[in-house]
Image (cartoon, helix red, strand yellow):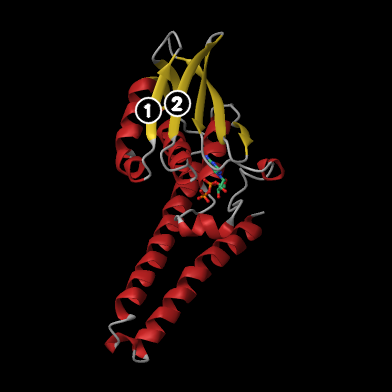
């Protein structure tokens, strides 16, 4: 399993590295003096570097999760405030896509029990995806419901949706429904694997339902903190 993972990592890193090598080679072979292509190739190089940074950052998150496996810092925290903070951090990205971020709080408490920082990562990844795979002019909605002594949390979008045959593999590391599209928008294929890992640490599951062309809803449960 470890060997397969390392193989995937090097494969994923190889693409941007070889691309960068190609761009630099072209610039060295005379492209640098050609105003029609020099900026274009530097921009492409920049994009490939960004991609490598995204991959390395996600790998760091995974490695941290694995080493801290048994050290969840579980405490009561205000989950509504947390989602408002995450919304703030995605405001610019959402505006670029003209996507509305909405919060619907129908639970009886604001307080959930969990590792606040890790749950923040869960929301960041899911909200980021809802924008990346959203529709221009669409919406991302985060809803909270009571479920006995627990809280049910749903993150929905009205974006491109996911074909049913892909749903089973969605949470695998490096799995992407559409590799080219994900690459184009800076995806690493690690975001949902991280979400699953964190929720499993909380003894919870991540669920998904989706209709291609209509949208996707991810949901999970947390204990209420009071
Ligand atoms: P990535 O970095 O590629 O976004 P993720 O692990 O976060 O990787 O997601 C895996 C794949 O699941 C994505 O490449 C995309 O195809 C699909 N996906 C994730 N979230 C959504 C969503 N909200 N709507 C449609 N497709 C999604």
* Label whose residue precedes the other's in the sequence (1 or 2): 1
Q: Would the CB of label 1 be found within 8 Å of ligand 1?
A: no
Residue sitting at x 47%, y 39%? 130
**Which residue is pictured at 62% across the width and 40% down the height?**
212
> Looking at the image, do the residues carrying marks 1 and 2 touch, with CB atoms under 8 Å apart?
yes
Tell me where residue 189 appears, x and y as whole percent: 54, 51
Q: Residue at x 46, y 74 (%)?
A: 19
Name the quadrant of the C terminus. top left
Residue 116 quadrant: top left
Q: Which residue is more in the foreground, 67 or 184?
A: 184
Please identify the quadrant where the N terminus is shown.
bottom right
Residue matched to label 1: 83
Characterize the local packing of mark 2: few (<14), some (14-19) or many (20 or more) Cα atoms within 10 angstroms: many
Residue 67 coordinates in the image, percent (x, y): 49, 44
Q: Quadrant of residue 213?
A: top right
Total numbered circles: 2
Q: Nearer the viewer, residue 175 or 139?
A: 139
């Amino acid at each position: 399993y470890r060997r397969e993972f390392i193989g995937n990592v090097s494969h994923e890193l190889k693409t941007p590295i070889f691309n960068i090598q190609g761009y630099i080679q072209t610039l060295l072979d005379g492209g640098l003096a050609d105003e029609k292509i020099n900026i274009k190739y530097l921009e492409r190089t920049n994009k490939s570097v960004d991609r490598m940074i995204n991959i390395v950052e996600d790998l760091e998150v995974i490695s941290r999760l694995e080493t801290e496996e048994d050290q969840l810092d579980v405490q009561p925290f205000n989950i509504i405030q947390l989602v408002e903070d995450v919304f703030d951090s995605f405001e610019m990205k959402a505006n670029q896509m003209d996507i509305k971020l909405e919060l619907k709080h129908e639970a009886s408490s604001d307080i959930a029990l969990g590792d606040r920082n890790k749950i923040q990562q869960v929301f960041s990844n899911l909200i980021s995806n809802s924008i990346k795979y959203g529709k221009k002019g669409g919406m991302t909605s985060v809803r909270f419901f009571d479920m006995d002594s627990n809280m049910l949390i749903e993150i929905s979008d009205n974006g491109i949706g996911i074909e049913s045959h892909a749903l089973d593999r969605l949470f695998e590391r490096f799995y992407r429904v559409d590799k080219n599209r994900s690459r184009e928008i800076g995806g690493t294929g690690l975001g949902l694997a991280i979400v699953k890992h964190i929720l499993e640490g909380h003894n919870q599951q991540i669920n998904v339902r989706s209709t291609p062309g209509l949208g996707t809803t991810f949901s999970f449960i947390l204990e209420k903190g009071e």
